[in-house]
Image (spheres, rainbow, N blue to C red):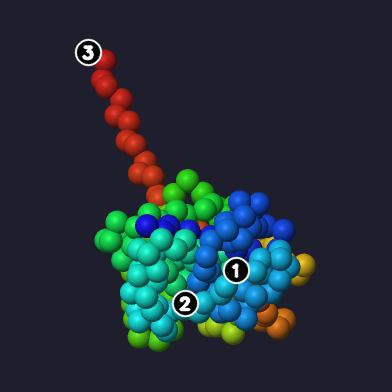
Amino acid sequence: MGKLYIVPTPVGNLEDISYRAIRILKEVDLILAEDTRTSSVLMKHFEISTKLSSHHKFNEKQSTQSVIDKLESGIDIALISDAGTPLISDPGYFLVNKCVEEGIIVECLPGATAFVPALVNSGFNTESFCFEGFLPHKKGRQTKIMSLVDETRTMIFYESPNRLLKCLEQFKEAFGEERRVSISREISKFHEENFRGTICEVIAHFSSKTVKGEIVIVLEGKEIKKEKKKYIKKDRE
């Protein structure tokens, strides 16, 4: 029986990949890539000659059984995404779930995930947070946002650069213009930017420039108002 390796790849800087990840990618028999053209750049840089096969959200349900068959025949396979850890707002859940059902060993290597450095850089509470990934583009988007209005944990979202301002405007309406937010852009790349402030301040900042690159939004949770304790002075007897 083969093994499925979940291998994180750099979200930007190629130096962020681990020695172990490179070794696994060289040793397996096949690498499943979200986009083989994107992944081929990484493969070439680290002189990895393992065969690449396409596995993305549009074909994973159709190709999963073929992958399972290969694993059951003894072939070791690695799953990678374009950047970061597979399954985290990326394809792979359907395959991993099927492997677990079939008793195939799945081993996930630790590695890069964009939301972790964004959360740490925000300065907000890191002990309790929720990862929401990408919000629905249209249907259900507003409903999802409103369901988080009373969320007290730090919230993390992924967003595309062309929808950033629209998203922040929706957040202003739902959470209030004074709610603090942190935007991390192009994490680990040359033009990395981390900008923090109230929602209004952040909207003003990004309205004055062309927004490019991958975006992580970290939104501060709702403040828990502590009730004032009433102290009753006991009358002397």
Q: Is residue 33 above or below residue 118?
A: below
**Among all residues in the image, which is located at the extreme right?**
190
Element marked by disc 1: loop
Element marked by disc 3: loop
Which quadrant of the figure has residue 100? Answer: bottom left
Q: Which residue carries the number 1 mark? A: 50
Q: Is residue 137 above or below residue 157?
A: below
**Among all residues in the image, which is located at the extreme left?**
237
Q: Which residue carries the number 3 mark? A: 237
Q: Which residue carries the number 2 mark? A: 55
Q: Is residue 76 visible?
A: yes
Three-letter code for the amino acid on which mark 3 is drawn: Glu
Q: Do the numbered discs 3 and 2 sit on residues whose CB atoms are within 8 Å?
A: no
Three-letter code for the amino acid on which mark 1 is drawn: Thr
Horizontal and vertical percent position of residue 25: 59, 61
Q: Earlier in the sequence, mark 3 or mark 1?
A: 1
Three-letter code for the amino acid on which mark 2 is drawn: His
Horizontal and vertical percent position of residue 44: 71, 71
Distance between mark 3 and mark 2 Cα atoms: 81 Å
Q: Residue at position x 72%, y 58% from top? A: 15
How many numbered markers are drawn? 3
The residue closer to the viewer here, 39 or 70, is 70
Distance between mark 1 and mark 2 Cα atoms: 15 Å
Q: Do the numbered discs 3 and 1 sit on residues whose CB atoms are within 8 Å?
A: no
